[in-house]
Image (cartoon, helix red, strand yellow):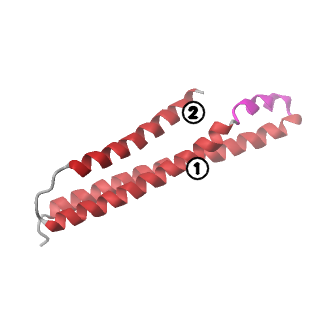
Amino acid sequence: MIRDFTNYAANERTFLAWVRTGIAVVALGFVIERFNLFLIALASASGAAPAMHGFRQFATPSGRYGGMALVGAGVLMIVIATIRFLQTARLLEDGSDHPPRRIRTTLFALSAIVMGVAFFSGYLAIG
């Protein structure tokens, strides 16, 4: 039996939750960027259909660069989560008590990324 298995399992569950979140953010960024290209193609074909001319206003640089920013934020989330997972696993193997100083910094960074993604997603939904 592994000593303190519940701590190892909790560390792994937390890591996998952050990886799932990062993959979801990458997928959202990819969809936004590709949908923006679809709208640009649809707007360029508006010469044949005057009713499609309204799609040109939706194809903006914020969709293209915003999608790439979300992909980058998702990858950054996965990288930070991996580093944190490895640090925590190393601390668990050590067996001694450690101050939670590093945990606060990492959680603050990951929370800032998540909040940035949430605000940008809200911006795209409204605008």
Q: Residues within 10 Å of mark 1 (few under 14, many from 20)?
A: some
Image coordinates for residue 8, horizontal then vertical, percent: 20, 62
Name the image quarter holding residue 11: bottom left
Amino acid bearing label 1? Phe
Q: Is residue 37 above or below residue 89?
A: above
Image coordinates for residue 7, horizontal then vertical, percent: 17, 59
Examine the structure image and report whether residue 51 is included in the region drawn in magenta: yes
- Per the rendering, the mark at residue 75 is none
Q: Secondary structure at mark 2?
A: helix
Instruction: Name the residue: 80% across, 30% down.
Output: 53
Instruction: Name the residue: 24% across, 60% down.
Output: 88
Count of residue discs:
2
In the image, taking residue 37 as reference, residue 96 lies left or right, namely: left
- Per the rendering, the mark at residue 30 is 1
> Where are the magenta residues, as a range?
48-59
Q: Quadrant of the N terminus?
A: bottom left
Instruction: Look at mark 2 in the image and give the residue it sits on.
Output: 124
